[in-house]
Amino acid sequence: MHEPRSVAVFGSCTTRDNFNSRFNPDYKTRYDVRLAANQTSVITMMSPPLDTDFTPTRPMSEYDQWNIRSDLSREFLPLLADLKPDYLILDFFADIHFGVLRLEDGRYLTNNRWKTWRTDLYQRLKETNGFERVRIFDDPDDYFTLWAEALERFAAFVAEHCPDTKVVVHCGFNTDELVPPGTTRPVPLRAFKKGSRIDVPVANRLWARLDDHAVSTYGWDAIDLRDEGYLTDADHPWGPFYVHYTMDYYHRFLAELDVIDLRDRVDPEVHERIREIAASGHEHAVAYARQWAETTRTQEERISELEGLGVLRSVKFALGQRVRQARARKKDSKTDAAKERR
């Protein structure tokens, strides 16, 4: 039995949840997560640290306070250099969902509305106009330029201090649909849970630009399940959200990481066969997702068409459908009876 591979995660719950026994009960037999940075922008991480303290302005867990301290101190970088893990897994959730705050002295911190906003530090900066909000949605090209320059320095740091670490980009995506309990038809996330809204197609295009740049520029491995049609889950442990996927997603992620890991453990020919098996599963999942999307689209168009008829015409149409179906059943019954007499 091989020792579990050491793992560092730079990203969000999108990646970290895959290494949680609630999602993948036996992951610890293969992987040991020893370091993480949560919800920190690449731009922030490669900015000089902020040696400042803060006080929560409302009750906050120790974990959330650690998130803020880690974001300010950039502690992840020296800890990563010391650890030199087998795998460093990245996702760029923070750059899509938060963006950064550019301070007057040119340093950055992640614009985390869930955590940083709930501190006296943020309130002081806001009252003194001590920052400029920088979001990818406001100027995608300028943000990408800033982010790509930071990623270049991040990649150089990893190459220098962790030359044997394999970097894996976890290609992220948002989903705005879920299937409520006891039903089979997906509904918009906003109809099930209130909260902040994003333009999902736009956000996913911007996210894909970051992921694709990271993979193509630095030759890093990727786990990419974007086209398999995953929805969010009403029963997700943290609740439904754009990146809280159905439970089968986390099993698929770990299987894809296993394929990458086996490349160094087995004969190249054997690994190629394993990769082909995994690819066939991916192919089936994509085909199923497309079929599901087409069925859903047809249903939505039909519903819109019926809604456009008005109440009276819709009722007449529905009654007509019932009559036609009854006639069809009667005809089928007569046909079956005639066959039996023969």
Image (tube, rainbow, N blue to C red):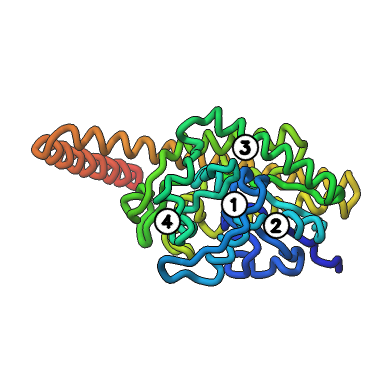
Instruction: Examine the rendered structure and indicate whether residue 189 appears above or below residue 292.
Output: below
Label drawn at residue 123: 4
Which residue occupies the extreme right position in the image?
Answer: 267
Where disc 3 sits, the SS reads helix
Q: Earlier in the sequence, mark 4 or mark 2?
A: 2
Q: Is residue 240 left or right of residue 65?
A: left
Please give the residue where the numbered disc 2 appears in the rendered image.
Answer: 76
Callouts 2 and 1 close, C-beta under 8 Å: yes
Q: Which mark is residue 84?
A: none
> Which amino acid type is shown beneath numbered disc 3?
Trp
Counting from the top left corner in percent of width and height, residue 182 is at 36, 61
Residue at 11 percent across and 39 percent down: it is 311
- Return the residue at label 3: 147
The reply to whether discs 4 and 3 touch (Cβ–Cβ < 8 Å) is: no
Which of the image's four quarters has the C terminus?
top left
Q: For the point 33% across and 39% down, which residue is it?
A: 299
Select label 4 or label 3 by which is in front: 4
* 276 relative to 78, above or below: above
Query: Which of the marked residues, 4 or 3, is nearer the chain's N terminus?
Result: 4
Q: Please give the residue where the numbered disc 1 appears in the rendered image.
A: 40
Q: Quadrant of the N terminus?
A: bottom right
Packing grade of label 3 (10 A; few <14, some 14-19, many >=20) is many
Query: Callout 2, which amino acid?
Result: Phe
Between 133 and 228, the one lying in front of the other is 133
* Front: mark 4 or 2: 4
Tell me the CA gap for discs 4 and 2: 25 Å
Front position in the image: 322 or 165 = 165
Instruction: Find residue 296 and report its image quarter.
Output: top left
How much space separates mark 1 and mark 4, taking CA atoms? 19 Å
